[in-house]
Amino acid sequence: MPSHFENNEPVLELDVLDAIENAATLLQTKPYTVALAGAGISKESGIPTFRGNDGLWTKNGEPPLDQYQRFIDDPLDWWHTRLVNSKGAFAQTLDNAAPNKGHTALAELEKLGILRHLITQNIDDLHRRAGHLSLTEIHGNRLWMRCIECGDRLPLDEFTYDPTLLPPRCTIGDCNGIIKSDTVMFGEPIPRAALAKSQVESAKAEVFMAIGTSALVYPAAAYPLEAIQNNKPLIEINPEVTQLSEYATIVVRAPSGTALPLIVERIRELNLVIQ
Ligand code: APR
């Protein structure tokens, strides 16, 4: 029950604190938690979300859905454009971003043995930089490259190619597939390995967390929904209502950079109590 009122309204943060307490208690008691992260977790790193008031797609409209088909039709054009174009504003924002307290706390949940796998829709590399080891970047990573045939991935800073021999080809065995950015383009199938890992881990979840995602884009949005259908408790961390909210066991209606550190702090306190 709220402990104090203002203008006859319960103070919102008490609801949030109750939700944080309940989330910490639930996470503490279940052996296997899987999370889906979206653009919202990177908002506090200065990276805009896609939807919502000041979202990228809200302001500029969604990119064309045939992005990948155009790449397949003319990979040389894509590579030439990549080589000659200077970085756009969004790429520079990503270059300047660093993991925020939400990323760090989520990586801490993995270190505590509570978060067993993170599926992220973000391509910004911030979860890797925060220290996650059990991670699926389902929409790829802007700082990695990938063969579109065999799916082999490698970090951009380990990728070498001859700019006179474009498009670069895969050198794994006799693959010879075309290499592109690991970032999944609109219209591009999600790489098989990422899909398989996400499905296996989501099926093992005892608790599912949806953090900073509007849960509108599939197949990523299917994982929290499947958890709900399998009667697994869902914890949603999002300052806004989403299509998941009404099904969530616990809704922490707050920014992830606020909520996640408080959840981790409370779990540590509970751990001390149990020991
Ligand atoms: N903390 C947590 N959540 C936040 C915060 C915050 N500080 N700020 C905003 N949010 C929430 C918004 O309320 C929204 O629900 O983050 C969510 C962001 O939703 P989207 O912009 O739709 O991002 P996402 O769910 O990751 O989109 C999925 O769509 O366009 C594609 O490939 C793109 O990976 C992206 C996918």
Image (tube, rainbow, N blue to C red):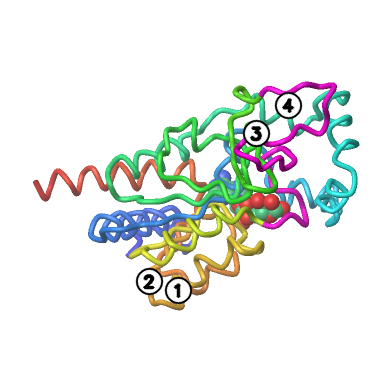
Residue 181 place in picture, x, y as percent: 71, 37
Label whose residue precedes the other's in the sequence (3 or 4): 4
Most extreme residue toward the left is: 275
Which mark lies nearer to you, 3 or 4? 3
Q: Give how far apart the Cα atoms at labels 1 and 3 are.
A: 42 Å
Count residues near mark 3 (Cα–Cα under 10 Å), then give few for <14, some for 14-19, many for 20+: few
Q: Residue at x 57, y 35 (%)?
A: 125
- Amino acid on which disc 4 is placed: Gln
Residue designated by label 3:
171
**In magenta segment, residue 54:** no
Residue designated by label 2:
232
- Amino acid on which disc 2 is placed: Lys
Principal SS element in the magenta part?
loop
Q: Give how far apart the Cα atoms at labels 1 and 4 are.
A: 38 Å
**Which disc number belongs to residue 92?**
4
Q: Residue at x 76, y 32 (%)?
A: 168
Compared across the picture, whether 181 is left or right of 211 comes to: right
| Labelled pair 3, 4 in contact (Cβ < 8 Å) | no
Residue 6 visible to an observer of this rendering: no
Count residues near mark 2 (Cα–Cα under 10 Å), then give few for <14, some for 14-19, many for 20+: some
Residue designated by label 1:
228
